[in-house]
Image (spheres, helix red, strand yellow):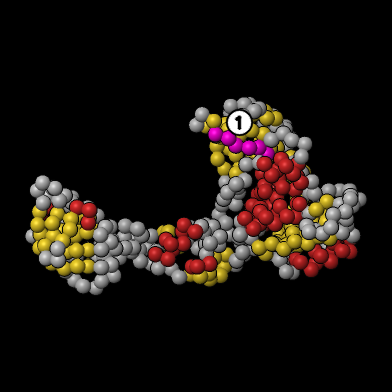
């Protein structure tokens, strides 16, 4: 399919990319992995009512009139540490010293904290009241047994790992992380770190795509190949067997030196689309080669990055099992009017600023393509057929600074 809509291109990838298989992953290695199943808690946490404070377990009625001017004295009947297996019962006129996290003894109505009570080893002096239930964390408050704690397709953050551990899991089923090979084509392309030569350019597209892969926890390998048919063919055949996905950069248009699509055609890949009605990035192609997804990106930096972010990255995230496979968005007010196109979807890089408690998006205008992309905080999408979005209107901004 050629010159298809942006929406259709996303739909085609969604219908033709299946997540990789799942594997067991230890809890200490779960960060940035994607859950391959719904995860339920195996236990209640806490497993018993526990104290929220260091203090004294008491009957609430015993101390309801306690104050600095009217201290109440209770008999000290024992002491409980967190993790202790001792059993005590709180009765009227008595108190049990208790540490934060210790199991609440039977008969307790409240815990009065240390700031309002003290003991001399025999009796407890209390100078403030404690309502029934005060400073007591009930059983299962943090997690209930069989409660859903992580949904299938969730990319796991550090903040979720403690919850998973508290729920009793030492490992989870997660999708295998895709192995991606990124291939830059062009006689003019130099590997980063090589001596500079006039007429050449360093492989900035290659590094940008690799950086995005790293940002999303995706393994990537980078290759540079000259504009020679046999060399490109050999690289494609070699790395398709070592990778879960190929991304090519450059050589995706229809010129004499644009060889990638032609070579893939000759190798019998299943071409699903070539050229999408987006600006920039129109020349992108997508298909399956040996049943593995291949994205062919144009070489111009803005076209390359938009094609990657809007079409290739969602495909990679789908391959890795993510349920959310688009860039995160926020709503902002448009700082300047922008123009779209009647027959394609337009993407615009811009910066964000906070003004009068509002977030404002300003389109970037610069002759430097690379500096424009480097300065951008986000991207707005102007749908096909919408020719103008006026200053002050609300827009959804795809964020380039987090996920």
Q: Residues within 10 Å of mark 1 (few under 14, many from 20)?
A: many
Q: Position of residue 90 (x, y in %)?
A: 13, 63
Residue 27 image point, x, y percent: 49, 67
Compared across the picture, whether 377 is left or right of 93 comes to right
User: Which portion, as a residue range, is magenta?
Assistant: 349-354
- 273 or 381: nearer the viewer: 381
Measured from the top left, where is residue 263 in percent x and y?
85, 59
At horizontal 76% and vertical 46% (from top left) the residue drawn is 301
The residue pinned by badge 1 equals 334
- Residue 24 visible in the current orientation: yes
Q: Residue at x 64, y 28 (%)?
A: 336
As helix, strand or loop, the secondary structure at mark 1 comes to strand
Q: Residue 65, can we see it?
A: no
- The structure residue drawn at horizontal position 28% and vertical position 61%, both measured from the top left corner, is 100
Magenta span: predominant SS is strand
Q: Is 232 left, or right, of 170 in this rendering? A: right
> Which residue is the extreme one toward the front?
120
Relative depth, front residue between 58 and 265: 58
* Residue 196 drawn above or below residue 25: above
Query: Percent x, y for residue 393?
Result: 58, 28
Report the residue at 10% width, 51% height from top: 71
Picture quadrant where residue 396 is located? top right
């Amino acid at each position: 399919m050629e010159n298809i809509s942006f929406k259709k291109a996303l739909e085609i990838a969604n219908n033709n990319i299946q997540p990789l298989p799942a594997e067991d992953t230890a809890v200490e290695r779960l960060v940035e992995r994607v859950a391959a199943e719904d995860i339920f808690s195996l236990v209640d946490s806490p497993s018993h009512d526990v104290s929220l404070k260091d203090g004294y377990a008491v009957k609430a009625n015993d101390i309801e009139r306690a104050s600095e001017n009217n201290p109440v004295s209770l008999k000290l009947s024992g002491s409980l540490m967190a993790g202790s297996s001792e059993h005590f019962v709180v009765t009227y006129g008595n108190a049990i010293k208790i540490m934060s996290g210790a199991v609440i003894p039977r008969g307790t109505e409240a815990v009065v904290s240390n700031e309002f009570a003290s003991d001399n080893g025999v009796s407890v002096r209390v100078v403030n009241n404690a309502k029934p239930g005060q400073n007591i964390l009930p059983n299962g408050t943090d997690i209930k047994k069989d409660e859903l704690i992580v949904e299938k397709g969730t990319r796991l953050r550090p903040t979720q790992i403690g919850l998973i551990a508290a729920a009793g899991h030492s490992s989870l089923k997660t999708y295998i992380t895709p192995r991606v090979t990124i291939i830059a084509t062009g006689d003019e392309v130099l590997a980063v770190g090589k001596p500079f030569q006039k007429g050449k350019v360093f492989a900035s597209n290659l590094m940008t795509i690799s950086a995005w892969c790293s940002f999303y926890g995706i393994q990537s390998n980078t290759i540079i190949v000259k504009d020679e048919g046999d060399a490109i063919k050999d690289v494609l055949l070699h790395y398709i067997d070592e990778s879960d996905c190929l991304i090519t950069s450059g050589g995706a248009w229809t010129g004499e030196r644009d060889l990638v699509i032609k070579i893939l055609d000759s190798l019998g890949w299943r071409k699903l689309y070539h050229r999408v009605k987006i600006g920039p990035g129109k020349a992108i192609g997508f298909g399956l080669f040996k049943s593995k997804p291949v994205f062919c990106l144009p070489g111009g930096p803005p076209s390359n990055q938009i094609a990657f972010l809007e079409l290739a990255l969602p495909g990679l995230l789908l391959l890795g099992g993510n349920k959310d496979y688009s860039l995160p968005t926020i709503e902002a007010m448009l700082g300047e009017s922008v123009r779209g196109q009647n027959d394609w979807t337009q993407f615009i890089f811009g910066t964000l600023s906070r003004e009068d408690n509002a977030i404002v998006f300003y389109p970037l205008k610069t002759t430097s393509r690379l500096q424009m992309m480097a300065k951008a905080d986000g991207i707005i999408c102007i749908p096909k057929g919408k020719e103008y979005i006026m200053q002050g209107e609300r827009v959804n901004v795809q964020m380039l600074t987090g996920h």
